[in-house]
Image (spheres, grey):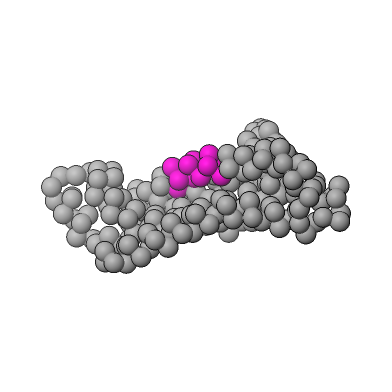
Amino acid sequence: MGALFDNLDVVAKAFGNTLWISVVAGILSFVWGVVLAAFRVSPVGPLRAFGTAYVNVIRNTPLTLVFIFFLAASPQLMGLVVPLGATMAIIAMTLYTSTFVCEAVRSGVNSVGVGQAEAARSVGLTFIQTLTHVIMPQAFRSVMPPLINVYVAHIKNTSVAAGFATTELVAIANRLANGNPGDVVGIFFGIGLAFLVLTVPLSVAAERLESRVAVAR
């Protein structure tokens, strides 16, 4: 691990980039994922069809192909040029992770009793009001543990960005390993520990929340 300590400033910058991409893409994917979940349970057919098609296509597509789409296809098909690096990583990971957020939230919505929605409609609430004031608050309580698991996977998926000119932890590990072939094991062991610093607290939080929800039920 000597190479890591000798380049601690570079590793710290890569750790910061990984954290930045994880947090920004995580927030955006949560917002877009909740919107998609609303689409999927919407009584409006076109919205429901769009949400279903989007989730099924993107969720079943490897994340690497989503990056490649923005790198090679979107400039020709859509005239959309996304800068390499953190910007592309945030956009690609937002579009990808939001599908898993959507399905987690949708499972929570489906766990809420039908009577709750019927009672809300009987007092004159619209679909949006029923969803935001009655259904979603109850749904979020039960989906927090699986949502956290989604974000554990989301953080680990930042490693894919290493192949697309993003200076994150795995990219730095590859660079240091190429320059220090005798310290490869130590370098990747250290990078693995850095990822654990990001993911273990989330895993512990998921276990605690899961036990609390189970007790509440």
Residue sitting nearer the eye, 1 or 163: 1
| Residue 210 visible in rendering | yes
Most extreme residue toward the left is 123
Q: Give the image location of residue 53, x and y in percent.
A: 50, 53
Q: Give the image location of residue 168, x and y in percent.
A: 68, 43
Question: Please, is residue 81 above or below residue 170 in the view?
Answer: above
Q: Give the image location of residue 12, x and y in percent.
A: 66, 40
Report whether 197 appears left or right of 10: left
Q: What span is colored magenta in the figure?
A: 21-33
* Residue ID at (23%, 61%): 114
Tell me which secondary structure the magenta stretch mostly adopts: helix
* Quadrant housing residue 165: top right
Report whether 104 appears left or right of 152: left
* Quadrant housing residue 15: top right
Report whether 21 appears left or right of 210: right
* Residue ID at (66%, 56%): 192
Asked if the magenta segment contains residue 30, the reply would be yes
Asked if the magenta segment contains residue 38, the reply would be no
